[in-house]
Amino acid sequence: MKKIAIVAIVCLIATPVCAESRQIAMADAIAAISAIKAISAGTTKVIKEGGQDKSTPAPYDLSPATRASLAHDLIRLTDATHGPIAEMQAVIRDICPNGTERANCAIGARTLVDKEIATSEVRKIAVDIVELTEADLALDKNQIPIEVLAALKVIVPSFEK
């Protein structure tokens, strides 16, 4: 956690020059947040130890600049989605007084909740992000899951294709 904080501070100081303001859908921003967290968590390596397999966490092989850019993007995306998510949750609470989850709503209210969620997912938000390339992610060295890569399309424009 300490490393992430240090990288985030360096990122805030060093990368805004490279940041570009873009309009992206909320659903894409939320997916990118999850993808960045997955990349930050790394992967799991299986090591033979005493004749038994042992799983151990292993970070992806990324440059410090790429890690700083990902930290910058994570902070910006989290900040940009915080307000709209809170607004959506407030509307859902108004529709479903029993709770903020769709499952807690009366059947008739679920349609309204589904409509609110769909509207929120396509809502565009402005975010200053640092774009990366496939080379920045060192895909020749890193076995990043395809689902994670697909969720990074707002950060790696070549993934949109």
Image: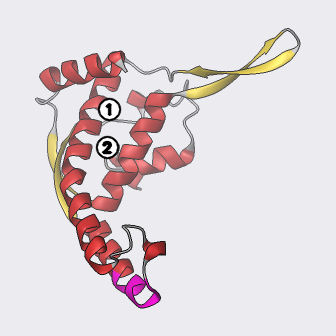
**Was residue 28 drawn as part of the magenta stretch in this picture?**
no
The single residue placed furthest to the bottom in the displayed view is: 108
Quarter that holds the C terminus: bottom left
- Label drawn at residue 155: 2
Disc tally is 2
- Label drawn at residue 70: 1
Determine which quarter of the picture holds residue 115.
bottom left
Instruction: State the image coordinates of residue 2 (x, y, percent, origin top left).
Output: 34, 16
Q: Amino acid at mark 2?
A: Ile
Q: Is residue 5 left or right of residue 42?
A: left
Q: Nearer the viewer, mark 1 or mark 2?
A: 1
- The residue that appears at 24% across and 67% down in the rendered structure is 90
Q: Which residues are magenta?
A: 106-112
Quarter that holds the N terminus: top left
- Label 2, secondary structure: give it: loop
- The residue that appears at 20% across and 45% down in the rendered structure is 79
Pick the front one: 83 or 25:
83
